[in-house]
Amino acid sequence: MLVVELGDGRLWCIPQPSHTLQSAAFAVPFGNREFAPARAPLVFGAAVAQHDNGWVEIEAEPEITDTGAPTDFLSGPAWPERLAMWWRGIDRCFAQHPYAGLLVARHGALLYRKVLATLDGDEAAATQGFLDAQPEVLERARNLLGGVPAWREALADGPLDAATALLAFCDLASLRLCLGWSHVTSLADCPVDEHGTTVALRVEVDGDEVALDPWPFAVDAFEAPVWGRVLDRGRFGSSVEYRAALSEAPVLERRWRVVNARTGA
């Protein structure tokens, strides 16, 4: 769950599946003469749209923190369940298509490598175990798909690294939208090619319009919607009380229009 405080003090609770669908809005049109599109775009888009599907069980019974506030994706769950959550998502996507499952695994590993040095004890050991298991996931995907030349090419190191970077970029773009673009002037690490080249995109925000430069998409403009429930208060006496309030909370949907800063299309 992404929990965003609105200007009037209410809380906008955005489910992870809503966020991942918004991420896919950035993935589907990506690529033009200057920016390489993803290999296997249909399966890649499915991976982006489902990269957090391991959260489903957690969000079916959301919890509150010790202060009574809704638990968001940063404050919970505890690390054993968080690692189990990643494996659930990997297995679900892998069952649909090995390439999708592999990309979800690599996305999780990318995030954990960034924080591994801040962990200690059992959490650090378990996280290292998650990272150590990644070569097995890759080998499994290559064994299942390697007989098809197009997939063998997509699973080579360069294209796979580029796809992993693109998933991370689409994920970050959605998070920036949900959590607030007003303080953001650039969006880093937009992949350019399959050789690891990336650029930062300049960001200009005007209400619900977001202009980017340079422009990495094949369309002139597109919409990036997201929805969530709006709570009138931010503290609850129990998780049961919070869940009841969330189930009755009205839905708020926002639609951002993403445009080319150079053309204003």
Image (tube, rainbow, N blue to C red):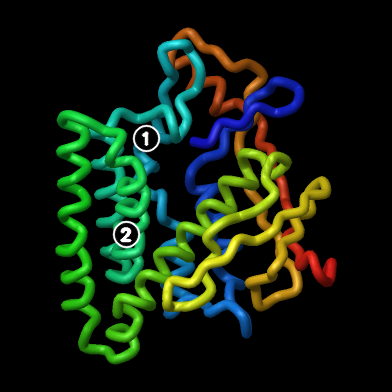
Q: Position of residue 234 (x, y in %)?
A: 59, 17
Q: Check the image and report above or below for 80 versus 207.
A: above
**Amino acid at circle 1:** Ile
Q: Check the image and report above or below for 202 versus 76.
A: below
Q: Check the image and report above or below for 207 versus 230.
A: below
Q: Residues within 10 Å of mark 2 (few under 14, many from 20)?
A: many
Of the numbered discs 2 and 1, the one sitting upstream in the chain is: 1
Q: Is residue 19 left or right of residue 186?
A: left
Q: Check the image and report above or below for 141 versus 66.
A: below
Report helix, strand or loop for mark 1.
helix
| Residue drawn at the location 62% of the way across and 39% of the way down | 179
Q: Which residue is mark 1?
A: 58
Q: Residues within 10 Å of mark 1 (few under 14, many from 20)?
A: some
Q: CA distance from mark 2 to mark 1?
A: 21 Å
Q: Is residue 75 left or right of residue 84?
A: right
Q: Position of residue 177 (x, y in %)?
A: 64, 47
Q: Position of residue 71 (x, y in %)?
A: 45, 25
Q: Position of residue 87 (x, y in %)?
A: 25, 49
**Amino acid at circle 2:** Arg
Q: Is residue 122 left or right of residue 55?
A: left
Q: Is residue 52 left or right of residue 188?
A: left
Q: Which residue is mark 2?
A: 106
Residue 100 placement: quadrant: bottom left
- Numbered marks: total: 2
Q: Nearer the viewer, residue 203 or 244?
A: 203
Q: Nearer the viewer, residue 67 or 156?
A: 156
Outermost bottom residue = 149
Quadrant in the picture for the C terminus: bottom right
